[in-house]
């Protein structure tokens, strides 16, 4: 259901140059569970895509989504539409400690490259997960699940820290 002309929900997950159709399909499932939309950027796999369809388990047909050439274009579009735009990157405020303003778009970047540097220059903030091990990040699908569920819990008043 690509809706280039239709408005996306008040919560959008922007995917910046994700390589894996499996991760993208997983994030479509997360978006569906939270009533969110998806903005796929660059070479991020988009429906219809056989590997994405398998992992998305039908949510690729029900989640509102659209494609942008770059995450910078997506961030500029959502900011101009009144969204708060955050990037999920190491070193930001912990997901469950932040306050969130809606409508909200959160950018999840390529696992090797992160969020595009040009895009990071215009975001309203950085949200992150604490890391206690030697790695500075976790799988993008896992990070998207943890961060978006923390945001949703805060939005619904279920998480007070």
Image (cartoon, helix red, strand yellow):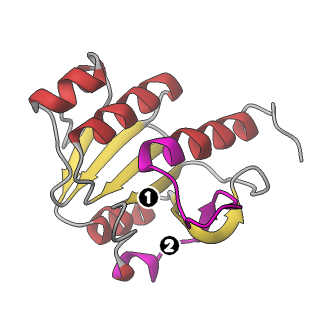
- Residue 134 locus on image (x, y percent): 61, 67
Within-10-Å neighbours for mark 1: few <14, some 14–19, many 20+: many
Q: Is 29 within the magenta?
A: no
Of badges 2 and 1, the one in the foreground is 1
Determine the image quadrant of residue 66. top left
Residue farthest along the right direction in this orientation: 161
Nearer the N terminus, badge 2 or badge 1? 1
Within-10-Å neighbours for mark 2: few <14, some 14–19, many 20+: some
Residue pictured at 70% horizontal, 60% vertical: 130
Residue pictured at 50% horizontal, 42% vertical: 142
- Residue 39 locus on image (x, y percent): 30, 48
- Asked if residue 78 lies left or right of residue 158, the reply is left
As helix, strand or loop, the secondary structure at mark 1 comes to: strand
The residue identified by callout 2 is 123
Residue pictured at 35% horizontal, 82% vertical: 118
The residue identified by callout 1 is 107
Q: Is residue 116 above or below residue 23?
A: below
Residue farthest along the front direction in this orientation: 134
Q: Is 143 within the magenta?
A: yes
- Residue 82 locus on image (x, y percent): 49, 59
Report the span colored magenta.
Answer: 118-144
């Amino acid at each position: 259901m690509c809706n280039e002309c239709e408005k996306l929900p008040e919560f959008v997950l922007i995917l910046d140059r994700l390589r894996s159709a499996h991760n993208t399909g997983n994030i479509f499932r997360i978006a569906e569970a939270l009533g969110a939309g998806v903005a796929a950027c660059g070479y991020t796999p988009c429906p219809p895509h056989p590997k994405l369809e398998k992992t998305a388990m039908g949510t690729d047909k029900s989640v509102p989504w659209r494609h942008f050439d770059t995450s910078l274009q997506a961030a500029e579009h959502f900011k101009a539409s009144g969204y708060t735009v955050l990037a999920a990157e190491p070193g930001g405020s912990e997901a469950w400690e932040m306050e969130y303003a809606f409508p909200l778009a959160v950018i999840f970047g390529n696992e090797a490259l992160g969020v595009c540097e040009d895009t990071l220059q215009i975001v309203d903030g950085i949200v992150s997960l604490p890391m206690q091990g030697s790695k500075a990040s976790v799988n993008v699908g896992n990070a998207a699940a943890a961060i978006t569920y923390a945001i949703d819990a805060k939005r619904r008043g279920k998480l007070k820290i």
